[in-house]
Image (cartoon, rainbow, N blue to C red):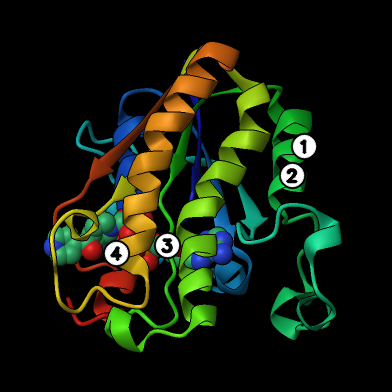
């Protein structure tokens, strides 16, 4: 069977969860990467059976999650983590959650993976038009929504088996004007799509893996509700 690592699952409402179910139904082993501040409530909810109804697969089986890794994809290595995050109580319970450390942990636990999924985005100023967006908000959107994918691929490519696949989720606002998708999120998705082409070229040659992005339709996930979509 195949093994998949899916970054960006913290409840049963988003694309990451649905992708986990589809891959599990197809026989894959599922590893998740969950944003550190959301980890506690996600693991508690899982343990208490809050997601049991949505864990049911079309074939009648249940989604089994082999392991949940704490992850914050805006930090690549421990050296990149600033003091205020280190001392933040929402990060205190978890460790080894930078991209490099998570890739190392997955390697130590499982050796390799076949599928890497990036299902995460964050744009702190998404409700502001681009014209009103601060430099800080714009760069934060690009960091969390786009460079996070470059970083994941950089650290996971060496443990992705030859012939493996990696995937992210994008949105049409990259190429058409969609009011309400602000804060640099349209820019982040445009960069993600361009990076997908370049990464497919580079990682295809270097690691023999495929790199794709899917332009998603609307889903009332937590992230979508936050922007009133
Ligand atoms: P989600 O809230 O389920 O997933 C986002 C996840 O990212 C959450 O679990 C967060 O905890 C996690 N996260 C945030 N920051 C970090 C971080 N630094 N490190 C680790 N994890 C982090 O929402 P989702 O399923 O909507 O989002 C998954 C992907 O789908 C994102 O790339 C979205 O941009 C993308 N996407 C979603 C939609 C949608 O409708 N939900 C659309 C297109 C793309 C879309 O916006 N018409 C109108 C709107 C849209 C499509 C059509």
Q: Which residue in the protein does label 3 denote?
A: 121
Residue most toward the front? 131
Please name the residue shown 25% across and 78% down the image.
225
Please report whichever mark, 2 or 4, sits nearer to the chain's N-terminal start. Answer: 2
Neighbour class for label 4 at 10 Å: few (<14), some, many (≥20)?
Answer: many
State if disc 2 and disc 1 touch (CB < 8 Å): yes
Please name the residue shown 52% across and 70% down the image.
139
Q: Look at the numbered disc 1 and give the secondary structure of its residue.
A: helix
**Residue 202's disc number:** none
Q: Which tag is nearer the camera, tag 4 or tag 1?
A: 4
Where on the picture, by quarter, is residue 95? bottom right
How far from the left and from the top, in percent, is residue 52? 36, 56
Please report whichever mark, 2 or 3, sits nearer to the chain's N-terminal start. Answer: 2
- Pick the quarter of the image with the C terminus: bottom left
Give 168 or 189, whichever is nearer the viewer: 189
Q: Is residue 133 left or right of residue 44?
A: left
Mark 3 CB in 8 Å range of ligand 1?
Answer: yes
Q: Look at the numbered disc 4 and give the secondary structure of its residue.
A: helix
Q: Which residue in the protein does label 2 denote?
A: 100
Separation (CA) of disc 2 from disc 3: 19 Å
Separation (CA) of disc 2 from disc 4: 27 Å
Q: Which residue in the protein does label 4 denote?
A: 186
Q: Which tag is nearer the camera, tag 3 or tag 4?
A: 4
Neighbour class for label 2 at 10 Å: few (<14), some, many (≥20)?
Answer: many
Q: Which tag is nearer the camera, tag 3 or tag 1?
A: 3
How far from the left and from the top, in percent, is residue 177? 13, 66
State if disc 4 and disc 3 touch (CB < 8 Å): no
Give 37 or 198, whichever is nearer the viewer: 198
């Amino acid at each position: 069977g195949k093994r998949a690592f899916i970054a960006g699952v913290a409840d049963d409402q988003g694309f990451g969860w649905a992708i986990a179910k589809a891959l599990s139904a197809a026989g894959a082993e599922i590893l998740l990467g969950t944003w550190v501040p959301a980890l506690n409530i996600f693991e508690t909810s899982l343990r208490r059976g809050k997601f049991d109804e949505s864990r049911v697969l079309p074939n009648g089986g249940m989604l089994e999650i082999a392991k949940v890794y704490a992850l914050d994809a805006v930090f690549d290595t421990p050296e990149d983590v600033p003091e205020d995050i280190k001392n933040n109580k929402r990060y205190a319970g978890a460790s080894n959650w930078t991209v490099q450390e998570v890739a190392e942990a997955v390697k130590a636990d499982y050796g390799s993976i076949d599928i890497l999924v990036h299902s995460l985005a964050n744009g702190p100023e998404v409700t502001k038009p681009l014209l009103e967006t601060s430099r800080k908000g714009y760069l934060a959107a690009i960091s969390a929504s786009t460079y996070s994918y470059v970083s994941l691929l950089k650290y996971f490519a060496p443990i992705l088996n030859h012939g493996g696949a990696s995937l992210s989720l994008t949105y049409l606002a990259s190429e058409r004007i969609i009011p309400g998708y602000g804060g640099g999120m349209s820019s982040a998705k445009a960069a993600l799509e361009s990076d997908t082409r370049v990464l497919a070229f580079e990682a295809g040659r270097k690691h023999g893996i495929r790199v794709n992005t899917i332009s998603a339709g609307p889903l009332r996930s937590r992230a979508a509700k936050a922007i009133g979509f």
